[in-house]
Image (cartoon, helix red, strand yellow):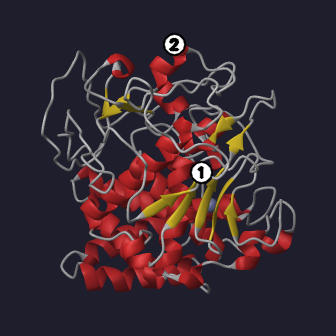
Amino acid sequence: MGNQWTRVGYYLATLLLLVVMSQACGQSFEVKGDLLNTNSNRPSHGWSSCHANTNPYPVLSSWSDHYPTPVRADDCLTNSFFNLCLTYKDPVSTYGDKFSPAFTPASATPQQERQVFVYGVRVPNAGPLTNSHFSMNTTNFAAVQPTVNGDWKHPYRNDSNHFVAQLHGWYWVNWFRSYLIERTGTFFASADIAKKKLLIRPAATHVANNAYFDSRDYSMSLGWSEYNHDGHKADLALDVATVLHELGHANHYIANPSSIDNDYLSYSCYQDQTYCCVDKYGCPAAIHEGVADFHAKIAFPDKDGTILNYFFNSPQGDQWRDLDRIEKNKITAHDLFARTNKGEIHDMGTVYASIWYGVWKKAKANCSEAAIEKLFVEHLAGIGGSDNFITAFSTIVAFAHQLFPEKAAQIIADFKTEYARMGLPVQ
Ligand SMILES: [Zn+2]
């Protein structure tokens, strides 16, 4: 799968030991019954336990507005308040188990759809899905429009136009932009800063078992997965953690264009050992992968696994990127480096993501995690093409002093603790 592209993808030839762990935290809202009209469109704070007041009547008034967090509504598909029903994180996470057979347009049943599309929001009645931040490529199929009922509740079964993929890719990308701006004030990857619109390819039908960010044309391609190799292709646009991972690459790239290393990111360590980190201290491509995974994790901290749950049809997803499992099992940078393909950049990215997650989780315990998110987003500008985990620590220290002079000592101490946990002591 290597080629000349500036590609940040993940490659599949991988692993799958299933260690299922459940951790349910945070809160979700259930909205039952038919809700009447509301003008409420307050920004919400997602699922953070510190901000549990999720708006039960989320409304998006225009495609350019702040995208509110969809709310749990088990009757979403029949509830007339909501005109769009989404999955939260991915179909497997929302359903709470793997599917047998996998949940795909070829195999989805109406009952499964009622179980999966249970996060509702009210959005504008008409398309197209467009705004000044992002654009969507629908070259190979029809752009999504409302159903004959005037809502956006398209079935996933037989979804040859990938309407559901378009809606998921569009909504969650915009939601995460809104979320990060609300929490940190900064989102690099939208057009106001990037000076170009990120092109979302919600159903890159030529991309098998992969999704990637491409800096050449500033696009993210969301392909399909066929985990069971039974001919049932699933749209990866519904694997929202993966979507936000690719968006994370875009965010880091715009923050610091030198962070993209063409050689490392165009080829895979599985194909050629040249394209791996050389030691447990990491490399720029690994930092990019870890940054991307951390984007995905803070969006959905209350669900099992970190990434690729839908891809693998598993609540744990990729176990070597499952940040809760990494911490629980005391897995270190050495362990991650020593896997079959020594220094593979996604394995090594887990080192960096795990360090940030450890600090973030500690802050979340006292409701100060938004400060860590601010530090995270801003520090991306200082991470470039010659960094490893150790030099990145110096960048973290510098940004902590700049952004939070009064808190910096504690934040830096917390990072030292997490670096040490990963077997990478820093001073
Ligand atoms: Zn990646």
Residue 189 location, quadrant: bottom left
Is residue 280 placed above or below 27 in the rendered structure? below
> Mark 2 touching mark 1, by CB under 8 A?
no
Q: Nearer the viewer, residue 284 or 176?
A: 176
Query: Which element carries disc 2, helix, strand or loop?
Result: helix
Residue 33 location, quadrant: top left
Query: Measured from the top left, where is residue 157 in percent x and y?
Result: 61, 23
Q: Residue at x 67, y 79 (%)?
A: 261
Other-residue count near label 1 (Cα within 10 Å), few / some / many at <14 / 14–19 / ≥20: some
Residue sticking out furthest to the front: 148
User: Which numbered disc, 2 or 1, marks the residue closer to the eye?
Assistant: 1
Q: Residue at x 27, y 54 (%)?
A: 66
Query: Which element carries disc 1, helix, strand or loop?
Result: loop
Q: Report the quarter where the N terminus lies.
A: bottom right
Residue 194 location, quadrant: bottom left
Q: Which residue is mark 1?
A: 138
Residue sticking out furthest to the top: 111
Q: Which mark is residue 183?
A: none
Is residue 193 found left or right of 201 in the rendered image? left
Q: Nearer the viewer, residue 112 or 298?
A: 112
| Kind of residue at disc 1 | Thr
Is residue 329 placed above or below 27 in the rendered structure? below
Q: Which mark is residue 111?
A: 2
Is residue 329 placed above or below 122 in the rendered structure? below
| Kind of residue at disc 2 | Gln
Q: Nearer the viewer, residue 4 or 264?
A: 4
Q: Earlier in the sequence, mark 2 or mark 1?
A: 2
